[in-house]
Each structure stands twice: as structure tokens, then as C-alpha cells.
């Protein structure tokens, strides 16, 4: 790795300059998605559910959806947007005529994806707090979890984006990967109560599970050693995937 | 030498894009790479600024090995890519600022440069209009401005005037000359031989990844052809009789046209008229140019120039 932080920040600033022009069209659809889930499932369906995991259903749902909002923010950025910049707009070809290096681009894009995750996750957290579903005191912890979610899903999405050659394949990523992840990662129901034995261990492989558990336990101030495992999983998997990205981005951009 | 490439080779899988090119570009000149589509010009440029790693051979720019220290090399050069790469939602000024940050130019200096470049490339009238609303000529000038934002010593231009109207081409040529006069070194590619002849001190004609000829344009014309050219219409079977015994340096046939190169085409024309008897054959006499050299070296039919 050969990252120069100032150059990575220049890449980040490019996206910020762009985003300041287009955020109105970008932010709204992605932001409203978890709000709709919260309303339909938390408030609507939740009215028929007594309690889940010892909480009113909407309160059970909220921490997971904060992570989902962060996941969506990062995912759109490192899939469609990065693909367009790389293959259609040729943004990286232009950057590579300057002292910016492929690793700086990678770092800048990951930082930017985390930024988008923070904007989406953060806004959604504020909505849930205003609603009384999450405690406002948990804000610093929410930020930590959101940044970790952003990092993890930036890394996961980037690995995919740097392998594929046509933009159509992203529908597989979203429909066959992110959607099931969203549905089966402790967000809507406690996995531990539905799975048993070895399946519980297998479920630990699901990436979204870890930020969701961090959020749910942390928001309730039920600190536990399992959270160390969650943080280690997120950091370890991100590092591994970004190492793969480092190799593929060189192959892609400097052929 | 500002650029020194030694026996540079680039393979993409089994395809050979560059098959061993040597380049030596001294400071302060404008050097042109000419060649048909797919000749390997863009690939050669990419190896010069170090974004593509040669399969074999080495490239030194400013005496620095680009493979070893690309950042140091690229901070001192500017590149205008064949395709414009602009942020369409942003204005020219914002595009220049974004690009300036890739070079880490301090804020005040960057603002100064932006102002200079708005004047130098005549961008001021639409300095704050989103790029997507601007004409092709304006966008191309902005693309060139971006490559000058770090005040480079070496400017690399990949087909700077392709697709531009004549007025914009003239304007771009004037800027290139001004930059050269200011002591910058310029490496450009073009498909326009008139452009090369007007701008370049030296050119290299490339085809299928090899340099076929290199030198000053007039030198190449003199070596490979002759000072003057005579074009006339004539049938295939007439050619031997027509040319028999004439002091001709080179002949080029394209479809129904024959071009004869000689140092004194007027006397050749005279002889042809005598041989034709009273019949008036249409003949055009003109100085030989780089386009003639290019066609003579790379072939004038599409089949021949395919790589
Ligand atoms: N990344 C790549 N992968 C595979 N082949 C490539 C790649 N880049 C270039 N080539 C091939 O290498 C050859 C030279 O391409 P290059 O773009 O350097 O030509 P060029 O002289 O710039 O042509 P043009 O005048 O059309 O711009 C072509 O056959 C091209 O298809
Ligand atoms: Mg080209």
C-alpha cells in the first residue's frame, strides 16, 4: 500500500464537490427507504407484535435499521457510482494523470462511502431519536457503529465492483446479496431465538449481523464481550477485502 | 532529455499494442506522434506518464524512472486525454479547483492559476456555467486548461483538436505555440498532418506499435519523398508508359489517382504533357507535405493500415 492522505482527501473532496450539486436527487430516495420500513413494519406490523427481544417492536427494529441506512449509503456509492466514475466518466483516468495514485483513489472512495453512510445512518438515527425509539445519549456510539458499517459495506461492495465488467450485475448484488442480508441479519427478528446449534455459528458469517448487534447492545447500554468479536470481525473482514481491492484496482486502472 | 524511452513494449494479452519504441524528446520542443487508429499512440503516452507499465523497456521522464517514482514525475507534467474527462455538473472554475487539489496546489496559488487559465484559454465568459451546457470546443479548451493547472514543464496532448471546428483548432494551435515559446516541452498525438507540420519540431510516424520514421517534418519529406508532388488521374495500365524514364523519387497510387514525387515536378508535368500529345490531362502541382510521407509509410488503403 502506498497511500498519501492528502491525495486521498483530494479524491474525497471531488466527490463532495459533486455531491453538493446533486444531493437533493440522491439523498431523498435512499434516506426514505428505512423510514418507510420503520413506519410499515415497526409501527404497522409492530402493533400486532407484543414484544420482541424484550422491547416494543419499533424499538427493537430501530437500531438495526440505523445500520441498514448506513449500509445503503455506502453500498450505492461503491457500486453504481464507482462503476460510472471508472468506466463511463473515466474519472480515475484523469486522476491518474496527476500525482494521485490508485491506492489514494481507493482510500478516498472508501472515506467518501463512509461519509455517505454517516449522512444516511446519522439522519436516520436522528429520526429514530426524535421518535423516542433510540436514546439520544447513544449518539457517539451510533456514530462509531455507523462508521464501522460504512467501512464494512464499502469494502464488500468494492470487491464486487472491481471484479465485474458490466453494470447490470449490480442487480445481483442488491437482490441476491444485500436484500437477504437485510432480511436475515437480526434486523427484523432475533436470530438467536430462531436458529439453533451450528446454524447460529454459521450466521456469524453474515456481515450485517455484527453492526446490528453492536447497535442494539450499545444503544441499550448492555455492553458485552461479544461486541469485541463484532468489532474484530468488521475490522478484519474490511482489511482483508480492501487488500483484495488494492490488487484489483491496480489491475483495472493501470493495465 | 525530458523524455527518454528505451525499447518500450506493451502487450495486452496476445495483442501487441507497442512493439519496441524508442523516444528521445529534448527540452523545449514540440514532438508529435503520428499514426493510424490503433497504432499505439495513446498506449505510448500512458507509458510515458507512468499509468501503464511497459511489458518490457523503461521510460525516464525528467531523468526519473516513472515506474519507480510516478508521483514525482506526474507533479511536473500535465496530460490532456483523448476523451475529455470533466465533471459535467460543475462549472469550469469548480473543475479547475478540483483538479488543482489533485496536485495539492495551495489555495491562494490555485485561485491565481484558475484566473490565469480562464484568460489563457478564453473560458471566462462561461466560467460559472455547468460544463454539460458548454460546446465541444469550450469543453476541449477546459480539458487543456485542467492539464495546465500545475504549470507543468511537460505537456502531453492526446489528439488535442480532433472533432473541433477550424476556429477552435486555430485557437488551440496558438496556445500550444505560446506554451512552447514559454519554454515548455510538448508531446502530442494527432491524425492531422497539417497540424503536425505546423506545430511540431520533430515527429515520429508510428504504425502497428513501431516507429517507421522520425525527424523534423521537412527532413522526413526530403528523405522519404521529394520536395514537390504532382497529382494526376490515370488508369492502372497507363502508369508504366507514363513514368518511363522520368526523374521520379517516389510514386503513390490511390484508386484512380497517381501522385508523383520529384524535386522539380514542373519539368515532369511538361514531359507528361508531351507524351499525352494534345490531350489535356488534369494535373495538380504542389509542395510535398507530411501527409504524403504518412501515406507513403503507413499505406493509403484501409486494409494496409489495419493492425
Ligand atoms: N486496455 C487495453 N486492453 C486491451 N487492448 C488495448 C488496451 N488499450 C489499447 N489496446 C489495444 O492496443 C492497440 C493500440 O491502442 P492505442 O489506443 O494505443 O492506439 P492509438 O494509436 O491511440 O489509436 P487511436 O488513434 O484510435 O486513438 C489497439 O489495438 C488497442 O485495441
Ligand atoms: Mg489514441
Image (tube, coloured by chain):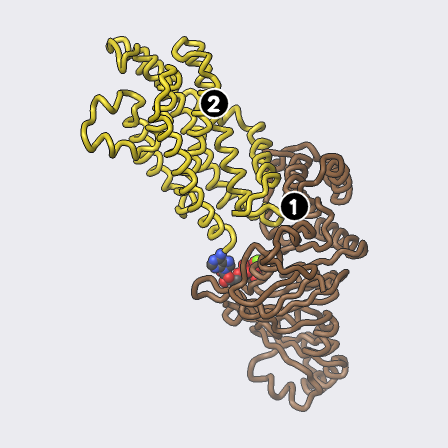
Chain colours: A yellow, B brown
- Front-lying residue, B164 or B278: B164
Q: Name which residue lies at 59% across and 76% down.
A: B253
- Front-lying residue, A251 or B234: A251
Residue B143 - label: 1
Q: Is residue B262 above or below residue B42?
A: below
Left or right, A62 with respect to B137, comes to left
Regarding residue A76, the answer to whether it shows in the image is no
Which of the two discs, 2 and 1, sits closer to the camera? 2
Q: In the rendering, at what x and y percent does residue B94 appear?
A: 66, 34
Q: Is residue A239 above or below residue B210?
A: above
Q: Which residue is mark 2?
A: A143
Q: Is residue B156 above or below residue B255?
A: above
Q: Name which residue lies at 54% across and 28% down.
A: A22
Left or right, B146 with respect to A70, comes to right
* Quadrant field for ligand 2: bottom right
Q: In the rendering, at what x and y percent does residue B55 appear?
A: 51, 64
- Residue occupying the far bottom of the picture: B245
- Residue occupying the far front of the picture: A225
Left or right, A208 with respect to B41, comes to left
Instruction: Give neighbour class at mark 2: few <14, some 14-19, many 20+ (Cα, 10 Å).
Output: some
- Front-lying residue, A161 or A236: A236
Q: Is mark 1 within 8 Å of ligand 2?
A: no
Splitting the image into 4 quarters, where does residue A44 fall? top left
Q: Name which residue lies at 33% across and 38% down.
A: A172
Q: Name which residue lies at 60% across and 87% down.
A: B240
- Label 2 to label 1: alpha-carbon separation: 40 Å
The answer for which chain carries disc 1 is: B
The answer for which chain carries disc 2 is: A
Q: Is mark 2 within 8 Å of ligand 1?
A: no
Q: Are marks 2 and 1 in contact (CB under 8 Å)?
A: no
Q: In the rendering, at what x and y percent does residue B29 appear?
A: 75, 62
Amino acid at each position: 500500500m502506498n497511500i498519501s492522505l492528502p491525495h486521498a482527501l483530494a479524491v474525497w473532496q471531488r466527490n463532495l464537490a459533486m455531491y453538493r450539486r446533486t444531493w437533493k436527487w440522491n439523498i431523498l430516495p435512499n434516506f426514505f427507504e428505512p423510514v418507510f420500513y420503520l413506519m410499515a413494519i415497526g409501527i404497522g406490523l409492530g402493533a400486532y407484535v407484543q414484544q420482541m427481544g424484550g422491547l416494543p417492536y419499533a424499538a427493537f427494529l430501530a437500531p438495526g435499521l440505523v445500520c441498514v441506512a448506513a449500509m445503503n449509503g455506502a453500498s450505492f456509492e461503491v457500486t453504481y457510482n464507482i462503476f460510472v466514475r471508472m468506466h463511463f466518466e473515466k474519472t480515475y483516468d484523469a486522476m491518474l494523470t496527476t500525482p494521485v495514485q490508485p491506492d489514494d483513489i481507493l482510500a478516498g472512495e472508501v472515506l467518501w462511502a463512509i461519509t455517505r453512510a454517516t449522512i444516511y445512518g446519522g439522519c436516520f438515527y436522528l429520526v429514530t431519536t426524535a421518535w423516542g425509539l433510540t436514546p439520544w445519549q447513544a449518539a457517539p456510539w451510533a456514530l462509531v457503529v455507523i462508521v464501522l458499517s460504512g467501512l464494512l459495506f464499502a469494502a464488500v461492495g468494492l470487491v464486487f465492483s472491481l471484479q465485474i465488467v458490466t453494470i447490470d450485475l449490480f442487480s445481483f448484488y442488491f437482490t441476491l446479496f444485500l436484500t437477504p442480508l437485510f432480511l436475515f441479519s437480526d434486523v427484523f427478528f432475533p436470530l438467536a431465538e430462531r436458529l439453533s446449534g451450528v446454524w447460529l455459528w454459521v450466521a456469524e458469517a453474515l456481515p450485517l449481523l455484527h453492526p446490528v448487534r453492536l447497535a442494539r447492545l450499545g444503544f441499550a447500554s448492555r455492553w458485552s464481550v461479544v461486541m469485541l468479536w463484532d468489532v474484530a470481525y468488521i475490522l478484519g473482514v474490511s482489511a482483508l477485502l480492501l487488500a483484495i481491492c488494492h490488487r484489483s484496482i491496480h489491475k483495472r486502472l493501470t493495465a | 532529455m525530458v523524455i527518454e524511452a528505451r525499447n518500450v513494449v506493451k502487450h495486452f494479452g496476445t495483442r501487441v499494442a507497442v512493439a519496441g519504441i524508442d523516444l528521445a524528446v529534448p527540452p523545449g520542443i514540440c514532438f508529435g506522434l503520428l499514426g493510424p487508429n490503433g497504432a499505439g499512440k495513446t498506449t505510448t503516452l500512458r507509458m510515458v506518464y507512468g499509468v501503464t507499465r511497459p511489458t518490457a523497456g523503461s521510460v525516464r521522464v525528467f531523468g526519473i524512472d516513472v515506474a519507480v517514482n510516478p508521483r514525482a514525475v506526474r507533479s511536473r507534467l500535465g496530460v490532456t486525454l483523448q476523451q475529455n474527462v470533466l465533471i459535467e455538473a460543475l462549472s469550469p472554475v469548480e473543475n479547475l479547483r478540483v483538479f488543482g487539489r489533485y496536485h495539492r496546489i495551495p489555495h491562494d496559488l490555485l485561485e491565481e492559476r484558475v484566473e490565469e487559465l480562464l484568460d489563457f484559454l478564453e473560458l471566462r465568459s462561461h466560467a460559472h456555467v455547468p460544463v454539460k451546457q458548454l460546446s465541444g470546443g469550450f469543453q476541449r479548451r477546459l480539458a487543456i486548461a485542467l492539464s495546465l493547472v500545475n504549470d507543468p514543464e511537460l505537456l502531453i496532448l492526446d489528439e488535442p483538436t480532433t472533432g473541433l471546428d477550424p476556429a477552435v483548432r486555430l485557437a488551440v494551435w496558438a496556445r500550444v505555440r505560446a506554451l512552447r515559446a514559454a519554454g515548455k516541452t510538448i508531446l502530442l498525438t494527432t491524425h492531422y498532418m497539417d497540424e503536425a507540420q505546423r506545430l511540431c519540431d520533430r515527429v515520429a510516424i508510428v504504425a502497428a506499435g513501431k516507429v517507421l520514421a522520425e525527424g523534423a517534418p521537412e527532413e522526413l519529406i526530403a528523405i522519404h519523398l521529394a520536395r514537390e508532388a504532382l497529382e494526376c488521374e490515370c488508369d492502372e495500365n497507363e502508369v508504366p508508359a507514363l513514368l518511363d524514364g522520368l526523374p521520379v523519387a517516389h510514386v503513390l497510387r490511390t484508386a484512380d489517382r497517381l501522385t508523383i514525387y520529384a524535386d522539380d515536378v514542373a519539368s515532369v508535368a511538361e514531359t507528361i504533357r508531351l507524351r499525352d500529345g494534345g490531350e489535356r490531362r488534369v494535373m495538380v502541382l504542389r509542395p510535398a507535405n507530411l501527409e504524403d510521407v504518412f501515406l507513403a509509410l503507413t499505406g493509403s488503403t484501409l486494409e494496409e493500415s489495419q493492425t
